[in-house]
Amino acid sequence: MKTILVPTDFHLAAENAMSAAVKLAKNMDARINLMTMFKFPKFKYQLVESIVHTEDEYYDMLKNDAAREIVRWKDWYPGVEIIGSIKEDFDQLIPAILSEEADLIVMGSEGANGWKDYFQGTNSQNVVRKADCPVLVMKENTAFEKIENVLFVTDFEKTGFIEKAMDLFNLKETKNKFVFIDTGESTDDRSDIYDTARDVEKLYDIQNFDFEIYRHDSVAKGTVEYAESHDIDLIIMFTHGRKGFERFLFGSIAEEVVNISDIPVLSIVEN
């Protein structure tokens, strides 16, 4: 882990993301790339001819405001290496985020009504879908004070994301719950699913392991319902990173969970 990217509009959800990123950076000896761009709501100004006479002056004002915010955030966290970057050449937020090299992206989200929605979904959903690295999404009403209860959501089709998550977080002291959301579509025998869960526990040497099959009509809504009822601090799940027609057919459970969950969600791509 070398670089944690934090896209920011300097609002509350982004502040929560930054706070989480700082804690992770300290644990992993990583640096933070604090990235902003002029498209964010904070930097929308009404042009008044008597104040701003040219387009260049307008953009200089935006750039200076962004630079001051970055310096202010750096002052808040003196114990972490923070690099500030200001994007002004991108028409959209997503290409700006994906243009940065990062080992982990930590971003704030206000859900479906947050940062300007594109027709593909919210910005956080788009990043979850398109990023090659893990993405941690924070909501404005959640903090990252502790990680005691961790929830892995899996059908055991993919398990590599479990190892990646264990590399990112120290999970030896946490209570690690695994849940299989049963929507009634699985043809596997329940005893076979429990056997697979025990095999995964041994394979990755998971401490404080607990597994449950949870019945719900929706995997995404069942995940959030289960997490809320079990005092979960972090939801971890894999995403296929499907694009185009394949995503239209199958959708993305991780994207839906990111959109509806107030609990932080870490998504990890498995192809």
Image (cartoon, grey):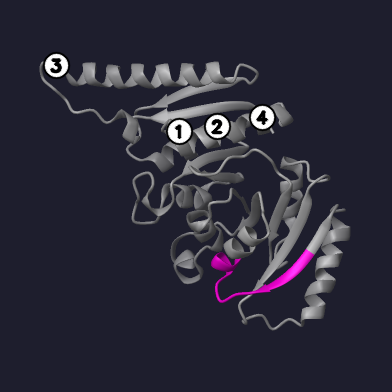
What is the distance, in whole Å, between disc 3 and disc 4 at their CAs? 42 Å
Residue on which disc 4 sits: 25
> What type is the residue that disc 3 sits on?
His
Residue on which disc 3 sits: 53
SS at badge 2 = helix
- Mark 1 Cα shell of 10 Å, populated few (<14), some (14-19), many (≥20): many
Marks 1 and 2 in Cβ contact (< 8 Å): yes
Residue at (46%, 51%) from the top-left corner? 126
Residue 18 falls within the magenta-colored stretch: no
- For residue 207, above or below residue 27: below
Nearer the observer: mark 2 or 3; the answer is: 2
Q: Is residue 39 visible?
A: no
Q: Earlier in the sequence, mark 1 or mark 3?
A: 1
Residue 213 falls within the magenta-colored stretch: yes
Instruction: Count all numbered tags in the image, as a single digit.
Output: 4
Marks 4 and 1 in Cβ contact (< 8 Å): no
Residue on which disc 1 sits: 8
Spot occupied by residue 158 in the image (x, y as percentages of width and height) = 70, 62
SS at badge 1 = loop
What is the distance, in whole Å, between disc 2 and disc 3 at their CAs? 35 Å
Q: Earlier in the sequence, mark 3 or mark 4?
A: 4
Q: Earlier in the sequence, mark 2 or mark 4?
A: 2
Residue on which disc 2 sits: 18
What is the distance, in whole Å, between disc 2 and disc 4 at their CAs? 10 Å
